[in-house]
Amino acid sequence: MKKLLVSAVALAMLAGCSSGGAASTANTSGGTAGKSVTIATDTDILSMNSSTSTDGTSFIALTMCEAGLTQLDEKNVPVSDLAESWDVSSDGLEYTFHIRKDAKWSDGTALTANDFVYAWNRLIDPETASDYAFLIDKNAESNTTNIKDWTAEDDQTFKVTLSKPCDFFLSLCAFPSLFPLNEKFVEEQGDQYALTTDNMLYCGPYTLTEWTPSTSWKFVKNDQYWDAASYAENVDEANWILVQGQSAILDYQAGNIDYVKLTSEVIDDYAGKEDVVTSLTGYSWYLSLNFHNEALANNNIRKAIAYAINTDELCTSVLKDGSTPLEGIVTKSTTANADGKDFRSISGTVVPGYDEAKAKEAFEAGCKELGVDSVTLEVLYEDADVSKNCAAYVMNALEKAGFTTEAKCEPKKSRLQDMQNDNYDVALHRWGPDYADPQTYMDLFVTGASNNYGHYESEKYDSLIEKALTTDATDSTKRWEDFAEAEKVLVNEDTAIIPLYQAGNTALQNTKLTGIQYHGAGVDSYRHMKLAA
């Protein structure tokens, strides 16, 4: 109790005596003065292997030191990167990418079209067991991008053939899973590839020079990057440190950190400060329900959970970071069709909505059907502050509806492992869109999908997704209508998941720091950071 009181007093003093945080001082975290930045993060890098990485923090790290055919600009539009240009056939089925002649790996060797052929083949190799193979798996009955084949016509020409047009293909080419790999180097490293900084080659604007798991990692400029000259004014060194809460804010105020997310407990204390920045991300936070649990296989029990949670109150009173209640699994302002309409305007609100009376009624009905008097659910969540606060609110809401809850708090890596191993009841989980299309969310819940942790199975849902990917694949309007109907089945009819909120982000950011790009779909980019003198 004394420790909590000391923390509260310390934060109150910091909020009261500081108006600009680190923005009022020069960064002193290392490197050349004015050219080094430090970012505080509450999640660790899980893997630097682009073939197997699956989490946002790892993807951000990969986009710092690696590169793709394209990259996303500040407006989320795909622009050239390792491919200096490309040609698209009139029917939209053939993409011919022209690889830059000055593209190199960090050891000075030339980067060629074969590096993409090798990387893409490795991604879909069953032995790789990549969760992202579905993006381009030409050996599957269907794949996300309708890809049929890819070949290296010569060192500078990479050709991709599709079976049907794919509106978001160029954006997807900026995604880390599709980054190139140097075959000779990767094969020499074997199972040690990407485990340390010595086991990697880089083709992006920075190289990873230091990496201490669960602690910190550092990037420095890569003079072999094809566009190194345009990075002259960018930071020379970018550091990430794993720290959160009071410690992170104290470091920010001391000038040791340039960017730190604010937790709900202290956001109000910094209202109106010039160094507070707020953004809305594309991340959907939802409750994953394990259908292998007998109670959760009951629709009334699932409905009781959905009705019990007041997501408006969760966002405004608990999170307080700009997050907004989800209306379905697909987030707002993340996807747009050819007419510029957001998917949410087409699908509408499909969540059951908060209703305490209906929650209790559904709980009692579910218990009767199961022949039990009580239901105990273990709630799994990770040890980041925002997850702890959200989980506490959710468990309290469930207990009001009649449930008994037990908490299971773990590091993110362990939480994901438990979900993969079917070792959970209810899990607080998130998904960030890999590309600007509702399919990036909808694929998650198809029967047998690698990310369908809860083992949801629905012939109706599967058939609608299949229809969107085959029969209606070339008709954008019908395709989105299929996804909208499938979302209603998933979220409302079957209550297979419980959508909670679209994540907002409120942070303290050094006012001299610019260039961080937030992408609602894809990966947020830190490769263009600058720090004014």
Image (tube, grey):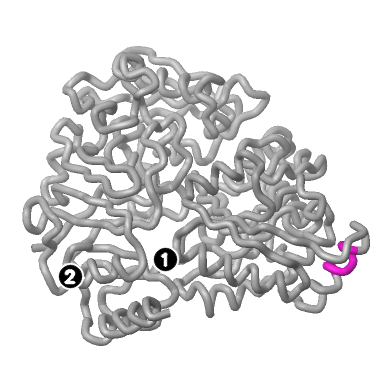
**Residue 7 percent across, percent down from the top left:** 34, 77
Is residue 71 rendered to the left or right of residue 471? left
Tag 2: amino acid: Ala
Q: Where is residue 444 in the image (x, y as percent from the top left)?
A: 63, 43
Residue reaching furthest to the bottom: 16
Q: Where does residue 8 sit, x and y in percent of width and height?
A: 36, 81
Which mark, residue 204?
none
User: Does residue 345 sit above or below 421 in this rendering?
Assistant: below
Q: Of label 1 and label 2, which has the lower sequence position?
A: 2
Q: Which of 206 and 215 is in front in this view?
A: 215
Look at the image and tell me in which quarter the N terminus lies.
Answer: bottom left
Q: Where is residue 388 in the image (x, y as percent from the top left)?
A: 51, 65
Q: Quadrant of residue 429?
A: bottom right
Q: Which residue is drawn at 87% across and 69% down?
A: 364
Q: Disc 1 to disc 2, how far (Cα)?
A: 22 Å
Image quarter of residue 104: top left
Task: Give amino acid for label 1.
Answer: Asn
Q: Is the magenta stretch mostly helix, strand or loop?
A: helix
Give me the disc on residue 505: 1
Q: Image height check: is 514 above or below 223?
A: below
| Viewer-side residue, 33 vs 468 | 33
First to last magenta residue range: 362-367
Residue drawn at x 34%, y 25% is 193
Q: What element carries label 1?
A: strand
Q: In this view, does 96 lie above or below 447?
A: above
Q: Is 364 contained in the magenta span?
A: yes
The residue depicted at 35 percent of the width and 41 percent of the height is: 71
Q: Is residue 425 magenta?
A: no
Q: Name the residue under label 2.
A: 254
Q: What element carries label 2?
A: loop
Q: Residues within 10 Å of mark 1 (few under 14, many from 20)?
A: some
Please rate how many residues cluster around mark 2, counting C-alpha atoms within 10 Å: few if below 14, some from 14 to 19, many from 20: some
